Image (tube, grey):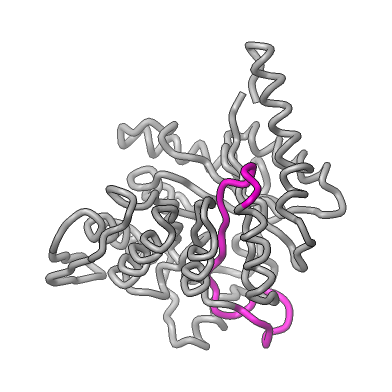
Amino acid sequence: MTTVRFGIKTAPMHVSYDDIRRVWREADAVPEIEDAWLWDHLLPLVGPKDGQAHESWTLLAALAAQTERLRLGVLVTSNRIRPPAVLGKMASTVDVISGGRLVLGIGAGGTHQPAGAGGIPGDNPAVAEYEAYGLALVPPAEGVARLDETVRILRRMWTEDVFDFSGRHHRLKGTRCEPKPVQRPGPPLLIGGWGTRLLRVVAEHADIWNVPGPPHNGVEFIAERGRVLDAHCADLGRDPREITRSVQVLVSYDDPAATRATVDALVAAGMNHIVLNLPRPYPKGVARWLADEIVAGRRTQEANAAARPGLTA
């Protein structure tokens, strides 16, 4: 039976820094929760437009300094907001601050998308966000190509003393990154998304693939995207089992049984890392509650399967 790892996600909008810090500190003391995540938006995606939205990497550095055990990252960093080498420098610094606990989560970022894309109702929220901050949306194919170059730049920043880079979208000369990350050859790389072209980049470069799950994307859709990733791996000669399959699940505080059922369905579809996305406001002791109500049930299933050989997830 598949052994599943669990993390949490606190989307930093319409919520205070103090509340996020409290939840992360709680989770740091709950070993059943292995990692914690933010997201990367500059304006709220839902709710009042004038609400709080904390910048993710600044916040991540603060939380890295105030936790000791959790692996941590941004799910996922927009590749359209920070130049690749700047992001590489930031990531190296956060890995040092955290003592080697960073997972570099990244996606293509703001691209031209139709209304309702990604399971989010309404117009593409990136339009208003990027206009407000002077950022440019790009066509999806260009977004994926830029992401591929960024990944190559990050790897070189973390492993080489000095280098030049000449790509279609990015040019660097005499790039250095000191200090290097604590983790060698660098932090694990998580790539988020589900498009066929993006999954090719996942197959070539990623340690972890992440995709939003229900209610944004259904279980069958995620399973089908996993098969596309498998096909890319076969084409590249890579063992698909090398890539952790990660999915985000919106938690129901009122109906934990429904959340457990969603987790079970996603595990049966091949996912082995569950990020529990926490609705606001965050209840006191929510990390312990997740461990008792969501994680414990899965661990019981795994233990029962181990005692009865031949069962699968």
Q: Is residue 220 above or below residue 25?
A: above
- Residue 111 in picture, x, y percent from top left: 47, 70
Magenta stretch holds residue 49: yes
Residue 4 appears left or right of 104 = right
Identity of the residue drawn at 38% across and 43% down: 203
Which residue sits at x=13%, y=63%? Answer: 162
| Quadrant hosting residue 11 | bottom right
Residue 216 rendering spot, x and y as whole percentages: 67, 56
Q: Is residue 95 above or below residue 80?
A: above
Residues in magenta, as a range: 29-53
State left or right for residue 12 relative to residue 215: left
Classify the position of the C terminus by image quarter. top right
Left or right: 204 as drawn, with respect to 44: left
Task: Report if residue 52 lies within the magenta region.
Answer: yes
Residue 290, image x and y in percent? 74, 48
Residue 253 at x, y = what percent?
A: 82, 54
User: What residue is drawn where x is 77% and y is 68%?
Assistant: 281
Q: Can I make out residue 293 in this image?
A: yes
User: Which residue is at 43% across, 48% downward?
Assistant: 199
Is residue 193 visible to the viewer in this orientation of the structure? no
Quadrant holding the N terminus: top right
